Structures are given as structure tokens and as C-alpha cells.
């Protein structure tokens, strides 16, 4: 039996620069970086020093506040440098990989037969815990908790998102094992969100509840599925894992190896080659993009939720995309005239772009206006399919009113759920940032 | 275009951070951004943004006001000439009206924008575009013969007390334009009501009487106009309130562009029609009523400031209710109370101004109860969850 989640409110954004379904091997990255700031609110305690020899799966650091959660090296090699920032905060652990990769041997296990405690122990000690995110707060899962349910969404509705079905192809066995592992971690069920239209083998997996998802973005966001099926109440925990990371979990249990292989889709209207590249987690951007693009923003992740990174930087831990769009640092005359510049997408009817619903848009990073006070009402609700009053919640976050945030549902949302509000709102407020700050306040005040 | 851009950048140089006139940057930026959408790029959050901004939204409302404004100018002249009996053409009437109204608009924008710029500089934020609409609305809802100093004073009151005292654009409780109107009405009642202000020069020229339809009804006299003229707007009244036709044209623009919420407008008309029908039915219930309660319900919708108020004032998103359900309730209540105040208040035969201001005050309460339903649902869900696990 499957469950249906149908979303009406949202926005399907058609952009230029979708990835062709071609998979190529990216050149081996000269260095690989694990970046602790990728793991929000984790304070790393190092267990190895600069110069240490590592195998793939060897421990690098653990969380200061939750010793059970361990973080491991994605490759075998030498820890070349620990890059620190202000107040000696660790920014990057740079590893130069060996030519021949060696793997630490973890215990092979059939998760369905094994003891639940033992499975959990293996997940968190082998570094797989870094792939498991917790709601509320959008932080790495705490090994001490037992979540009421685990959600995986294999639906890609975000603009230019990588196709999960393409990425998971040939890995469906590992995916199944990974899901089996997840079933041992929760007291409830494991839910897998699948595109209602899809007929692929992904919908024939076992031991999970399949959720048929339908509708415009953010329908595929795991948060929407959680909210529609099993919303989070005060004190409850739900874990979410991205599908490709489920395969990494499954592979470790089947083969005993931590294989940090990552398929990255290069997308965007400024990208020369829009394809899928096979590389390692934390690879250099240089290894994927042969030459530095000019006046272009490189984003690790998608255009709505990703993070701006440098050409000389590294891809972030979780995202499966590298998005390239032109910087919009130019002026545009009389842009305030209604019905002018219809080549720029607008959800508002003050532009005629709604007449061309099939058109694929060129985008850039221009703010298309300036930040203003919140004036227009009703527009945020149009892209918020959850049972949440977005503007009221944002205002509560701005005011730091904990009681109000709680009663308006702060536990049910994470920044990515507000990404479309970032995009569409007239006043150009940074909704995702406001929610992140609200969540951080909740972590310190409520925990 | 590049040449203009270069010149602008040169002019702006002394206003850049660290330079001499840094503090006055919002003033120059406000002018600059009217020519160009700035080169600002996204810093946090989503990397791409929608083409809409507040300037575009506000300009759309200004465009929607244009038909009513043009008609108002013509009607001012038409009312004057048709009563003096002089020969006149379309342009004569229009010029007569423009001669009266353009100075009012200039004063309203001049005084109001000066204050807005001053506050933006003082508070160190960019100039918000809200006043573009407010500044045009204020003259449009005044009687034509109001002295310019009174317009200026009303504007000052509206901006200072109605808006900036609450923290500026987006924070005000009352609609600023109506605050200006209410100020003028309560501070100078003789200028704002009675028989002599609604038609141009009515106080100075003999033979011109400037009574509004509602004033005539309140005085217990016969109304000389037909419903058709009330709808097209060839009647005396505040400058732009008379033509329901032109107002509906504007309404179409702001509803289709979703700048104004249709729920409030529909709710307002439904509420007013309901109250009108109820009052019309009074005689059949054995209550006598008065000339205003017996005035046909559909006429109530097209005379006075009702249509203008519901379309352009009640829909101001800042002072209106902000939730979907709240907007329905807010709109309907405005309609109901507007007609109620209009018909049963002996002092002044119009109710839309007071009813919108009243509902502005209640809007946060309406929203509170709508949002509370969501909060309760969440709490209840939590309780059932605890019961299940217990």
C-alpha cells in the first residue's frame, strides 16, 4: 500500500542548463577536503594530526557534544593541512589522496538480521551518521536519539535538480540495504518519497512505506512529505537521509567499505558542460570544472538552497550538484515598470512571464530590486504547501519570540522549506537566513 | 544609457560609504533606483530572485489610480460648468479640474516625500515606495476646494503620526491616506462637509450648489441623479471617488496583477449589499427608517466613497488583515459597517472612511483568531500524540 502526497501550492521553475543524462568520470582530485562548517552546529574535536596517514573510513574528528557521532576520511591519503579561521575554528581538513585507495575494513552485516543496537553503533562510529539529518533544527542526527520516523525523498522538484533515478541506477541493491539499515534506527517507519509518475525500479524497494509525491516544487522537499504524513511535535525527532547517501550506508554494510563516491550534476546557464560527473565527496571544484568561468557564481547545491563556493574551493559534503549561473552585477533601466522585462521570470502577475509557462529562463544573481519592509501579504502562502503561516513565523523569528515560534510550527521547518519564499517575495527579505537564525536560537534556548 | 549610468555614478561618488555625504545616500539612491534597477546581487539564501520588487508593485497601484484621477479632473470641471450654465468642451472641463487638482498632488508629494526622505536619512534605511501611492491617494479623496495648506497639514499628520510613529512603512496600523482624510475631517469639519465644498467654487459663485447625493438624502431632499450617472460618476463628491466605472477599471488591474487581494474587494461589496438589503427591508418589518436606509441597496454601492475606499484603501496590505480567511472577514465587516455608519450616523452621511479605519484597528485581532486556529490544531495534534504513546 502506498500513500499519496499531492501538493498544489508551489512553483515549478524552468531554467536553462539542465544536466544531460551522461555520466563521465571526473579527473582524480589533487586534494580532498572535509569541511566541518558543512556540519551545522558541530564543534569538531580532532583525533588525528597533520601528516597522519589515513585509510578511507579512518576517523578524523568527533563532535564535542556528542561523542558517538564520528566523522571519517572519505579517501585514503595523508592529512596535508588543517585550515583554521577566526578563533582557531577549523574550516577545512585537506587530504592528499593516495594513488591506490585503501579502505578501513568495517564489519559486514545484514542489517535485517543484526541487532538494532549493533547496527546503530556501526552507523555512527563509521562516519555514516554525518549523512543523517535531524528535524527539527536541520542539524546532524544525535546518536542518542531514536527518531519517530525516517524519511528519504527521491523526488527532485527543485529547479535544475539532479535526477535521483539516474544517480541511483545500478546501485539499487545498496540502496535497498541502506533502507534496511534505516529501518533499524527508528521506532517507527521508514518513508520513501517517489515521484508519482516514475515507474523505475526505485519504487519496488521493500521494507519501507512508499509515498507517491505529486506537484510543483517544493513537493519533493522531504520536509513537505514529513509535514503531510507525520508532522513533528514538540520534543519529537525525525531523521532524513538523501537517497545517494542511503546507498553509501548500504554499501558499507554490504562490503565493509566506506565508499565516498559522489555523482555531481553540473548544471546552470553558465555551465559549459552540463553532465553528471563521478567524483569523491569533498573534491576540488577545479577537478570538475576544467577552467575558471568568468563573472560566474559557482554554487554547491541548487540555485535556491546551495552555497556559493570559490573556484579554488571544494564541493560541500551533501549536495549532488554544482550550479553555475552568471553574476547579475549590472544595471537594468526602468526595471520597475510593470510588464517590462518579461524575459526575467516572475511569479507576480505584474510581469507577463506567466504567459510563457513553457519557456526556460536564463537567470542571474541580480536581486532585481532592493530589500524593503514587508508590505505585500498573501504571496508567501502561495509557495508554502505546509500547514504553516510563513509570514507570521518569519516575524516571530525576527522578533526572537520563542513561544510564538513554537506555536507557529518552527519545529516543522528548516531553511530549505523557505527557499521559494526567498525567491518570490517582493520585499527581497532573506527568509532562509531568518529561519536558520530562529532555529539556532531554539537550539540554544530549548535544545 | 551607459552615458547616463556613468554620470550617475559620478554624481553618487560623494555619497558612497566613507565619503563626505554618506548619510544622505538613501536620498540619492532613491532617485537612482528610479532610473536603474541596481547591480545588487544575492548574498544569502536563494541565489536567484523574482523580477518583482516593491517599486513595481506600488507603480501598478498608481497606474490603477490613473483612470479615476483623469475622470476626477474632468468631472470637477463638468460639475462647475454644468451648474454655472457656461458653454464648455471636454478640454475646458479637464483643464478647470487639472488647475485645481495638480497643485494638490504637487503639495502632497512634495511635503510627503520630503518627510519620507528625511526619515530614511535619519533612520539610515532606503526610501520605501509606499508613499508613491499614499501621496496620490490623499488629494484624490479630498473635496476639490480644500486649501492647499490643509492638504499639507494632513499629509504631515498622516506621515508622522499615521506611519513613522509606528516605525515606518510596513509597521503602520492605520491606512496613511485615510489618516490624512480623517485628520482633515475632524480638524476642519466645515471644510470637509456640508453643501459648499464638493463642487469647484461652490462657495464663491452664486448659483452653484455642491451637495453630494448622500448629503441631499441626509437633508431629506429629493435626489436628482439616476443610477447610471452615479455609476459613471457625473455627480458631485470628493475628487476621484465618484466614478465607479473608472474605479472598477483600476480594480481590474490590481486584482489581475494580484497586487490587491480580490477577497477584500468582493467581501466589501458583499457586506455592503447585505447591509443595504437589510436596511431596505426595514419598512416591510414595520420600521420606518430614513431616506438613507430606504435608498436602494445597489445605489449604496455606487455613490459616495464606498467603491473607492473598498478598492484602493481597504486593500492596502499593511493595514488590512494578512491571512486569507482574515481578508474575507475584514472585507465583509468593512462593507457591513460602512453602510451602517453611512445610514445611521446623523452627523455625516458617509461611512467608508470610518469603517475602514475601524477595521484597520481590528485587523490584527481578526488575524490573531485565524492564526490561533492553526496553533490550536498543532497543540491538539501534540496532545493526541502523547495520549497514544502514554
Image (cartoon, coloured by chain):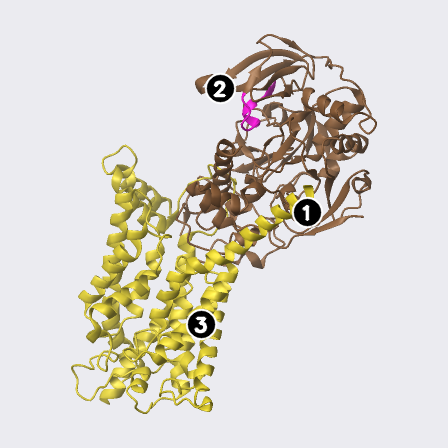
Chain colours: A brown, B yellow
Q: Which residue is mark 2?
A: A89
Q: Where B66 sits versus A154, above or below?
A: below
Near mark 2 (Cα within 10 A), the count class, few <14, some 14-19 or many ≥20, is few
Q: Where B278 sits versus B12, above or below?
A: below
Residue occupying image coordinates x 47% and y 58% = B367
Residues at badges 3 and 1 in contact (C-beta under 8 Å)? no
Residue A6 position, x and y percent, is 68, 53
As drawn, the label of residue B249 is 3
Near mark 3 (Cα within 10 A), the count class, few <14, some 14-19 or many ≥20, is some
Residues at badges 2 and 1 in contact (C-beta under 8 Å)? no
Residue B313 lies left or right of residue B102; in this view the side is right
Near mark 1 (Cα within 10 A), the count class, few <14, some 14-19 or many ≥20, is some
Chain at numbered mark 2: A
N-terminal of the pair, mark 2 or mark 1, is 2
User: Disc 3 to disc 2, how far (Cα)?
Assistant: 61 Å
Q: Where B283 sits versus B272, above or below?
A: below
Q: Which residues are magenta?
A: A32-43
Amino acid at each position: 500500500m502506498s500513500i499519496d502526497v499531492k501538493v498544489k501550492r508551489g512553483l515549478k521553475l524552468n531554467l536553462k542548463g539542465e544536466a544531460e543524462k551522461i555520466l563521465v568520470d571526473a579527473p582524480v582530485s589533487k586534494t580532498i577536503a572535509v569541511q566541518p562548517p558543512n556540519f551545522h552546529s558541530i564543534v569538531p574535536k580532532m583525533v588525528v594530526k597533520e601528516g597522519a596517514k589515513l585509510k578511507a573510513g579512518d576517523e578524523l574528528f568527533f563532535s564535542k557534544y556528542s561523542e558517538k557521532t564520528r566523522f571519517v576520511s572519505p579517501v585514503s591519503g595523508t592529512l596535508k593541512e588543517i585550515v583554521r579561521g577566526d578563533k582557531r575554528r577549523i574550516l577545512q581538513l585537506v587530504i592528499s589522496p593516495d594513488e591506490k585507495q585503501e579502505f578501513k575494513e568495517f564489519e559486514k552485516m545484514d542489517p535485517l538480521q543484526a541487532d538494532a543496537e549493533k547496527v546503530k553503533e556501526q552507523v555512527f562510529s563509521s562516519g555514516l551518521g554525518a549523512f543523517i539529518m535531524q528535524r527539527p533544527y536541520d542539524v546532524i542526527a544525535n546518536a542518542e536519539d531514536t527518531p519517530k520516523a525516517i524519511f528519504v525523498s527521491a523526488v527532485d522538484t527543485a529547479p535544475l535538480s539532479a535526477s535521483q533515478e539516474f544517480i541511483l541506477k545500478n546501485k539499487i541493491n545498496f540502496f535497498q540495504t541502506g533502507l534496511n539499515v534505516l529501518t533499524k534506527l527508528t521506532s517507527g517507519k521508514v518513508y520513501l518519497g517517489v515521484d508519482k509518475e516514475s515507474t523505475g525500479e526505485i519504487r519496488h524497494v521493500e521494507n519501507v512505506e512508499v509515498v507517491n509525491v505529486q506537484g510543483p516544487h517544493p513537493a519533493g522537499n522531504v520536509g513537505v512529505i514529513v509535514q503531510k504524513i507525520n508532522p513533528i511535535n514538540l520534543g519529537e525527532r525525525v531523521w532524513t537521509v538523501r537517497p545517494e547517501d542511503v546507498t553509501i550506508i548500504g554499501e558499507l554494510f554490504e562490503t565493509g567499505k566506506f565508499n565516498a563516491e559522489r555523482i555531481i550534476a553540473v548544471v546552470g546557464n553558465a555551465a559549459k558542460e552540463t553532465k553528471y560527473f563521478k567524483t569523491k565527496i569533498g573534491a576540488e571544484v577545479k577537478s570538475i570544472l576544467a577552467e575558471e568561468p568568468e563573472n560566474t557564481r559557482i554554487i554547491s547545491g541548487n540555485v535556491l538552497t546551495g552555497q556559493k563556493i570559490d573556484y579554488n574551493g571544494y564541493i560541500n559534503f551533501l549536495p549532488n550538484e554544482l550550479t553555475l549561473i552568471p553574476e547579475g552585477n549590472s544595471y537594468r533601466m526602468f526595471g520597475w515598470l510593470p510588464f517590462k522585462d518579461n524575459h526575467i521570470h516572475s511569479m507576480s502577475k505584474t510581469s507577463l512571464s506567466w504567459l510563457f509557462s513553457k519557456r526556460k529562463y536564463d537567470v542571474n544573481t541580480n536581486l532585481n530590486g532592493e530589500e524593503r519592509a514587508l508590505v505585500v501579504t498573501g504571496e508567501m502562502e502561495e509557495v508554502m504547501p505546509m500547514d504553516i503561516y510563513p509570514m507570521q513565523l518569519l516575524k516571530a523569528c525576527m522578533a526572537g519570540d520563542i513561544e510564538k515560534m513554537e506555536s507557529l510550527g518552527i519545529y516543522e521547518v528548516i531553511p530549505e522549506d523557505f527557499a521559494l519564499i526567498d525567491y518570490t517575495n517582493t520585499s527581497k527579505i532573506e527568509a532562509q537566513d531568518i529561519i536558520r537564525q530562529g532555529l539556532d536560537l531554539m537550539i540554544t534556548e530549548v535544545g | 544609457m551607459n552615458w547616463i549610468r556613468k554620470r550617475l555614478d559620478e554624481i553618487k561618488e560623494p555619497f558612497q560609504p566613507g565619503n563626505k555625504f554618506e548619510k544622505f545616500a538613501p536620498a540619492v539612491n532613491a532617485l537612482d533606483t528610479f532610473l536603474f534597477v541596481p547591480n545588487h546581487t544575492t548574498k544569502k539564501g536563494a541565489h536567484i530572485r523574482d523580477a518583482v520588487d516593491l517599486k513595481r508593485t506600488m507603480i501598478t497601484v498608481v497606474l490603477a489610480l490613473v483612470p479615476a484621477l483623469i475622470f476626477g479632473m474632468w468631472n470637477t470641471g463638468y460639475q462647475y460648468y454644468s451648474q454655472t450654465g457656461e458653454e464648455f468642451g471636454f478640454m475646458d472641463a479637464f483643464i478647470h479640474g487639472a488647475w485645481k487638482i495638480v497643485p494638490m498632488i504637487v503639495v502632497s508629494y512634495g511635503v510627503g516625500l520630503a518627510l519620507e526622505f528625511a526619515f530614511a536619512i535619519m533612520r539610515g534605511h532606503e526610501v520605501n515606495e509606499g508613499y508613491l501611492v499614499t501621496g496620490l491617494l490623499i488629494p484624490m479623496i479630498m473635496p476639490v476646494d480644500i486649501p492647499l495648506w490643509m492638504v499639507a497639514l494632513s499629509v504631515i499628520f498622516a506621515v508622522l503620526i499615521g506611519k513613522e510613529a509606528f516605525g515606518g512603512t510596513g509597521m503602520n496600523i492605520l491606512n496613511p491616506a485615510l489618516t490624512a482624510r480623517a485628520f482633515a475631517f475632524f480638524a476642519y469639519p466645515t471644510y470637509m462637509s456640508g453643501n459648499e465644498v464638493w463642487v469647484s467654487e461652490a462657495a464663491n459663485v452664486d448659483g452653484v450648489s455642491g451637495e453630494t447625493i448622500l448629503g441631499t438624502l441626509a437633508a431629506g431632499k429629493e435626489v436628482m441623479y439616476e443610477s447610471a450617472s452615479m455609476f459613471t460618476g457625473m455627480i458631485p463628491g470628493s475628487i476621484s471617488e465618484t466614478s465607479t466605472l473608472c474605479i472598477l477599471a483600476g480594480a481590474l488591474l490590481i486584482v489581475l496583477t494580484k497586487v490587491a487581494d480580490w477577497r477584500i474587494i468582493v467581501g466589501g461589496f458583499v457586506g455592503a449589499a447585505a447591509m443595504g438589503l437589510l436596511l431596505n427591508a426595514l419598512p416591510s418589518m414595520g420600521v420606518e427608517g430614513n431616506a438613507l436606509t430606504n435608498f436602494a441597496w445597489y445605489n449604496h454601492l455606487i455613490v459616495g466613497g464606498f467603491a473607492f475606499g473598498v478598492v484602493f484603501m481597504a486593500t492596502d496590505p499593511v493595514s488590512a488583515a494578512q491571512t486569507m480567511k482574515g481578508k474575507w472577514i475584514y472585507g465583509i465587516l468593512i462593507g457591513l459597517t460602512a453602510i451602517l455608519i453611512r445610514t445611521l450616523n446623523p452627523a455625516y452621511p458617509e461611512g467608508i472612511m470610518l469603517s475602514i479605519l475601524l477595521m484597520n484597528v481590528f485587523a490584527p485581532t481578526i488575524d490573531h483568531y485565524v492564526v490561533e486556529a492553526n496553533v490550536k490544531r498543532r497543540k491538539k495534534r501534540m496532545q493526541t500524540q502523547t495520549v497514544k504513546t502514554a
